[in-house]
Image (cartoon, rainbow, N blue to C red):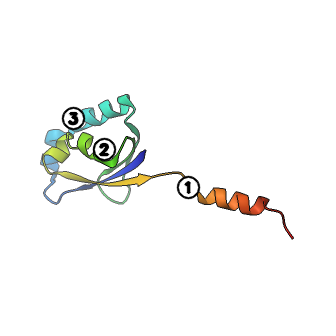
Amino acid sequence: MKVIAVSTLAPQADNAKIEAHYVAEAEAAWRLMMEGFIREAYFRDDNRGVVFVVEAESVEQVRRRFADFPYVAHGLLTFEYIPVGPFRAFDDLVHARSAPRP
């Protein structure tokens, strides 16, 4: 299952608190990338935070694994978890166009 994880910094996440855990946070994310759990990583352009594309068994698995991130554990960051699947509208379009025409 593919899950998009979109982070939001908590209001109390000031620069000093972020910097205190920055290296540990980066190392935690790197480990999950090296495992193949996190497949893609992006910085948000609209806000401070990140977006991860994750390959997991469930949204709950992502939630459990991300709970170990220092920013999450210290209440500095939250995630929204969005499960996604294949875009099936193309299949409908292709089948509709390949149907015999009267």
Measured Cα–Cα span from mark 1 to mark 3: 37 Å
SS assignment at label 2:
helix
Q: Is residue 67 left or right of residue 88?
A: left
Q: Position of residue 69 (x, y in %)?
A: 21, 40
Q: Earlier in the sequence, mark 2 or mark 1?
A: 2
Measured Cα–Cα span from mark 3 to mark 2: 21 Å
In the figure, residue 38 lies in which quadrant? Answer: top left
- Residue type at mark 1: give it: Phe
Circle 2/circle 1 CB separation < 8 Å:
no
Q: Position of residue 81 (x, y in %)?
A: 33, 53
Q: Is residue 75 left or right of residue 95?
A: left
SS assignment at label 1:
loop
Q: Earlier in the sequence, mark 1 or mark 3?
A: 3
Pointer 3: residues within 10 angstroms few (<14), some, or many (20+)?
A: few
Decide: is 44 above or below 23.
below
Decide: is 29 above or below 102.
above
Measured Cα–Cα span from mark 2 to mark 1: 22 Å
Q: Position of residue 82 (x, y in %)?
A: 37, 55
Residue, x 39% and y 46% (percent of image)?
Answer: 42
Mark 1 — residue? Answer: 87
Mark 3 — residue? Answer: 23
- Residue type at mark 3: give it: Val
- Residue type at mark 2: give it: Val
Pointer 1: residues within 10 angstroms few (<14), some, or many (20+)?
A: few
Quadrant where the N terminus lies?
top left
Q: Position of residue 86 (x, y in %)?
A: 53, 51
Mark 2 — residue? Answer: 62
